[in-house]
Image (cartoon, rainbow, N blue to C red):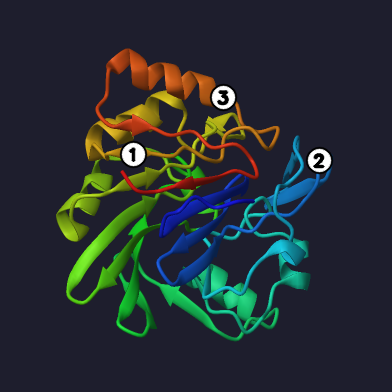
Amino acid sequence: MTAPADDVTLTFGGNATTLLHLGPFTLLTDPSFLHRGQRAYLGKGLWTKRLTDPALQPTQLPPLDAILLSHLHGDHWDDIATRYLDKATPLVTTQEAARALERKGFAATSDLKPWQQHVLASGDDELRITSVPGVHGPGPLAKVLPPVMGSVLELVRGDAVSWRGYITGDTLYRPFLGEVLERCGPLDVVIPHLGGTKALGLTVTMDDRQGADLVELLKPPVTVPIHFDDYDRFKSPLGDFVAEVRRRRLPGELRTVHRGETISLRA
């Protein structure tokens, strides 16, 4: 993995697992290390089988400033993560996930409510993490699935925000996501979780059209889609999203990333 000459980069590990280098900060998101053919438990008797191999393993990771977890599902946090990730690493997640992982020995959890903020500091630099609410399922299914959060990440140097990005987490499109712009300001990049995931016959993550709706709503200079083909419950491939964005002639650059690849998150 050779990083470009840039201070804000993403290395794609597959599914929703990314390694983010944001100035002096290094974050791991939604660590899923299962291999092709292994199954992840989603709760309530639901399982999903991995179709690909991960591009990152715990032994390949650099020292981490934090782990960012959108929610506690087996395709976003698995037994390998529990066993091998350093339990002293700060872990920023939902209140429910924080309680569950504290019981497994992770001692530095930060449980965020919607729009609550957690700050990492390094010298004169800060990384602000703001929790964004999400909806992981329609109607009654929302009560069955675990609470989910997106995150706005802001790299702050001095008093100025030098970069701002939004990772959606496993949410469906909802117009209230426009509050990201109202509360946090304009974005440099959006990283949507796509896939059109199906559970009990219902869609529980954004498909191609919902993903395009989000791009149309937030109008980011750069969009980097992830979470689209690694598990067998994904029913909306990346190509459909790319085609829908182009069909609508939406502004900004669509920057796709392959497993194991490192890309810039600058516009």
Left or right: where 258 falls relative to 94: right
Q: CA distance from mark 2 to mark 1?
A: 30 Å
243 vs 253, nearest the viewer: 253
Residue, x 42% and y 55% (percent of image)? 6
Q: Closer to the N terminus: mark 2 or mark 1? A: 2
Amino acid type, residue under disc 1 in the picture = Val
Label 3 packing within 10 angstroms: few (<14), some (14-19), many (20+): some
Circle 3 residue: 237
Q: Quadrant of residue 121?
A: bottom left
In the structure shown, which secondary structural element does the residue marked by tag 2 occupy?
loop
Left or right: where 219 falls relative to 147: left
Q: CA distance from mark 2 to mark 3?
A: 18 Å
In the structure shown, which secondary structural element does the residue marked by tag 1 occupy?
strand
Q: CA distance from mark 1 to mark 3?
A: 19 Å
Amino acid type, residue under disc 2 in the picture = Arg
Q: Closer to the N terminus: mark 2 or mark 3? A: 2
Q: Closer to the N terminus: mark 1 or mark 3? A: 1
Q: Which mark is residue 222?
A: 1
- Please indicate, yes or no, whether residue 233 appears anywhere in the rendered image: yes
Q: Position of residue 204 (x, y in %)?
A: 51, 38
Residue, x 78% and y 71% (percent of image)? 83
Circle 2 residue: 36
Q: Position of residue 172 (x, y in %)?
A: 41, 40
